Image: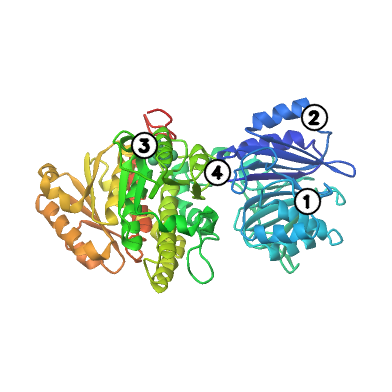
Amino acid sequence: MCGIVGYVGPRPVVELLIPGLARLEYRGYDSAGLAIQQQDSIAVIKQVGRIADLEHALSLSPLPEGHTGIGHTRWATHGAPNTINAHPHRDCTGSVIVAHNGIIENWADLRSELIAGGHEFASDTDTEVVAHMLEDLADLPLAEAVRSVMKRTDGALALVVMRASDPDLLVGARRGSPLVVGKGDGENFLASDIPAFLEHTRRMVVVDEDRVVEITKESIRITDLEGTELPLEERVIEWDLEAAEKGGFSTFMEKEIHEQPRAITDTLRGRIRRDGLVDLSELGLDPERLRIVDKVYVVACGTSFHAAMMAKYAIERWVRLPVEIDIASEFRYRDPVLDSNSLVIAISQSGETIDTMAAARYAKAQGCLLIGVTNVVDSALARESNAVLYTRAGPEIGVAATKTFTTQLVALQLLGLYLAQVRGSRDEGSLVHLAAAVRSLPKLVEEALQASTDIEDISQKFAHTRDVFFLGRSGDFPVAMEGALKLKEIAYLRAEGYAAGEMKHGPIALIEPGVLVVGVATDTHVRAKTISNMQEMKARGATIVMVVERGHEQEAEEVADHVLTVPPGPDLICTVTAVVPLQLLAYHIATAHGLDVDKPRNLAKTVTVE
Ligand code: G6P
């Protein structure tokens, strides 16, 4: 998501901030900006688009030289990607400057309060509230004012601020979003990530949760929110630049797989109320509009289609509405029966896939209610939809979808629970119970990730396997389909995802020694049936891997050569955890073959052709 870099020192700051921002490009962004401290004021320049667009704007109206400044790349969450919403943001007087990475959950309340107090807002962002709050605290030392802001804001924040009245001082703060200090000689840096300053210094200090940091060119001071000074723990960075961008992981895909707990936390943020019920009032849909829906269609492509499969099971079970799912390229040409009582949910992480967009436009033209689920703010799908539900996975660089998939599953689970609540199809107690399980997913996924090393070991054994089946029933069926797709995409193996009960109607003819069959059996009400289907595979000589919930290892061991466990949880919600070992399996098999998992052959991240 957003990237921040700040500098205090003797060097001309623009020449440091622009390359620093370029090193953070991998985080994804849609606009960029700089703020440079002058004698008694702060100059700001912002530009929608790429860093090259910002450089072009600078060439037309250069900033005066300065030695303290902040640069920011924005990945839109609140407010469209445009120049006004680009960071840094200012207070009413222009003397307080703020760059932010994250989401301020209570921004709407804070904004109303500040407007009532006479502040005027220039942007639609959540960030701008911080500048105006700091304006009201102009009498306090800047770090103390930032501590006070931190106590009044909820959500994820990494802030870097400066004030015209405090030359050569940057104050940063962190909760939820990353922030690191680069320690130089007679100069210091503050950034979202190490690559922003790695060519200038290898010495760094991590800013921990709920800490405020003050940097000048000679000093670094970290305090907690009460103002107590804390010792600095300096580290030396051993990685090179490329490794640093990958956060110490060897590929972006591996990094993104491991980012899933954080991505899911962000996707959940602010969407489950204190009383335990889901709140998607952000969709801006009249509950009455949702109550007249009599049929649901879910359309998507690729991995997003597997999220659609899970959505079908969840909406049918929780909302008791009939749901049809379609591959978008089929939907648009098959003349589906749609009317104004139909709800069409279009899922696309990029929000640009041409087939999904065509299906969405077709549905809207038929008068359907269109809800878009996407990871990209203001994407074509977001603009086309009557309501948008954003996943907040952050940019995904690896071509094969991982964190965008699991956050789609979570977003769709929230949507299913919200529809059930609005339509009264389930009692509140059971909705609260299910929402609590969704809320626990970051922790459960974290636990599922801990099996990575075991899966790596097992994967070595399958390095020469050519044919793989992934089988599951009910909520495990989309998981099996996704496991097979991941293996096809990045390891180039012939892999088929199948409904476990369907194997006997044909594909079982392909089972013989040497074939690997991965059975997913986390859905409680069909577990025994899936396991007995796996017996049928074993009897024909297949090698068996089973994915089951912890506590069911024994049943699985009776059939499987290898058992992978995931933490237990309610049916359907567990799809999110069950897919993690399959992502890891595909990843480790592909890397055992020495393949480039981030850029698989023949594939594009966003497909804008039919
Ligand atoms: C491409 C990608 C897949 C992705 C699919 C749908 O084929 O390689 O990983 O699942 O597009 O993309 P979307 O952006 O619509 O979710």
Residue placed at 38% from the left, 50% from the top? 341
| CB under 8 Å between discs 2 and 1 | no
| CB under 8 Å between discs 4 and 1 | no
User: Does 176 sit above or below residue 593?
Assistant: below
The x and y percentages for residue 564 are 29, 58
Mark 1: amino acid: Glu
**Residue bearing the label numbered 2:** 62
Answer yes or no: is residue 197 visible: no
Picture disc at residue 484: none
**Residue bearing the label numbered 3:** 594
Disc 3 and disc 4: Cα gap in Å? 35 Å
State which tag comes first along the sequence, 4 or 2: 2
For discs 3 and 4, the disc positioned in front in the rendered view:
4
| CB under 8 Å between discs 3 and 1 | no
Label 4 neighbour load within 10 Å: few <14, some 14-19, many 20+? many
For discs 3 and 1, the disc positioned in front in the rendered view:
1
State which tag comes first along the sequence, 3 or 4: 4
- 167 or 325: nearer the viewer: 325
Mark 3: amino acid: Gly
Label 2 neighbour load within 10 Å: few <14, some 14-19, many 20+? few
Label 1 neighbour load within 10 Å: few <14, some 14-19, many 20+? some
Give SS at disc 2: loop
For discs 3 and 2, the disc positioned in front in the rendered view:
2
Disc 4 and disc 2: Cα gap in Å? 30 Å
Give SS at disc 4: loop
Mark 2: amino acid: Pro
**Residue bearing the label numbered 1:** 120
For discs 4 and 2, the disc positioned in front in the rendered view:
4
Q: Locate the C terminus by quadrant.
A: top left
